[in-house]
Amino acid sequence: MFSFDASARCAVRGDALPPGQRAVKGWPVSHYGPVPRFRSDRWNLQVFGATATGAKHAWTFDEIRKLPMTAVTADLHCASGTTTLGHEFFGVPASAVLDLAPPAPDVTHVMAWAEYGYSANMRLVDFTSEQTLLATHHNGEPLTVEHGFPLRLVVPHLYGYKGPKWLRGIEYMTRDRRGFWEERGYHNLADPWTEQRHSYQEDE
Ligand SMILES: Nc1nc2c(c(=O)[nH]1)N[C@H]1C(S)=C(S)[C@@H](COP(=O)(O)O)O[C@H]1N2
Ligand SMILES: [Mo]
């Protein structure tokens, strides 16, 4: 048996399409449920669960905006088969969250939480990948509300459902637990290069 590092492979391939994907123009909007309204006085990003100190961390959007930011170029692959190429996202690297709010040593997974209870689980290594970003901007403009304003997780090396729009929380976990689509038949890992779309494939 051997395995690839999906993110490294993606970077090497440039704008190549993962198997079974077709490129579409523009940037279609797709999500489950309504688009939440942003209320700056009520909004925060919380980091909770198995933190190193046991304490919960919370930042307002003004505090988030003052954190060091970086740009990431990414393709977005929806598990239903469409890909949009060449997005430039700008925001806080997920690894910075780990520095600001360290996890306990036995943390192996994170759950990313969005408004209305949408969630996506991933391995800690996926969250700390160099490409994973808490994005505030897209192609030089603030994210539109349909695409996740004010904050959206982007995990370029996994299918789109691993990237919650309207991100509100990061939960550190000491064991894996399935998120919203992962509980509804989608693959727990979601590597587009090996077409990990459906949960029934996990038994293969
Ligand atoms: N909060 C939330 N985030 C979400 C979703 C959702 O239903 N709710 N859908 C995901 C899926 S399946 C995809 S493919 C992308 C789509 O992002 P886009 O609308 O910006 O193209 O958002 C992801 N993030
Ligand atoms: Mo999707």
Image (tube, grey):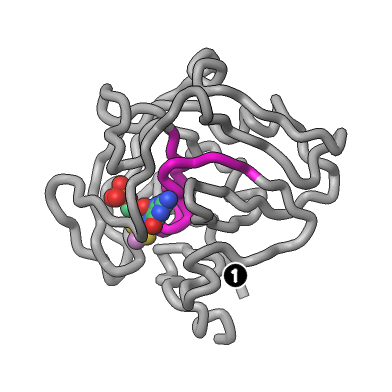
Figure quadrant of the N terminus? bottom right
* Residue 12 screen position, x and y as percent: 39, 47
| Residue nearest the viewer, comparing 70 with 185 | 185
Q: Is residue 194 above or below residue 11?
A: below
Q: How many marks?
A: 1
Q: Is residue 179 above or below residue 170?
A: below
User: Would residue 157 be found to the left or right of residue 46 on screen?
Assistant: left
Residue 8 appears in the picture as rendered: no
* Residue 191 screen position, x and y as percent: 47, 63
Report helix, strand or loop for mark 1.
Answer: loop
Image point (31%, 32%), residue name:
143
| Residue nearest the viewer, comparing 118 with 103 | 118
* Residue 49 screen position, x and y as percent: 76, 46
| Residue nearest the viewer, comparing 25 with 48 | 48
Figure quadrant of the C terminus? bottom right
User: Would residue 161 be found to the left or right of residue 50 on screen?
Assistant: left
Is 138 inside the magenta-drawn segment?
Answer: no
Amino acid beneath label 1: Phe
Image point (48%, 52%), residue name:
116
- Where is residue 32, by image quadrant? bottom left
* Residue 180 screen position, x and y as percent: 51, 64
Is 154 inside the magenta-drawn segment?
Answer: yes
Image point (48%, 75%), residue name:
184
What stretch of residues is rendered in magenta? Answer: 151-170
Name the residue beneath numbered marker 1: 2
User: Would residue 125 be found to the left or right of residue 167 on screen?
Assistant: right
- Where is residue 3, by image quadrant? bottom right
Ligand 2, image quadrant it occupies: bottom left
Q: Residues within 10 Å of mark 1 (few under 14, many from 20)?
A: few
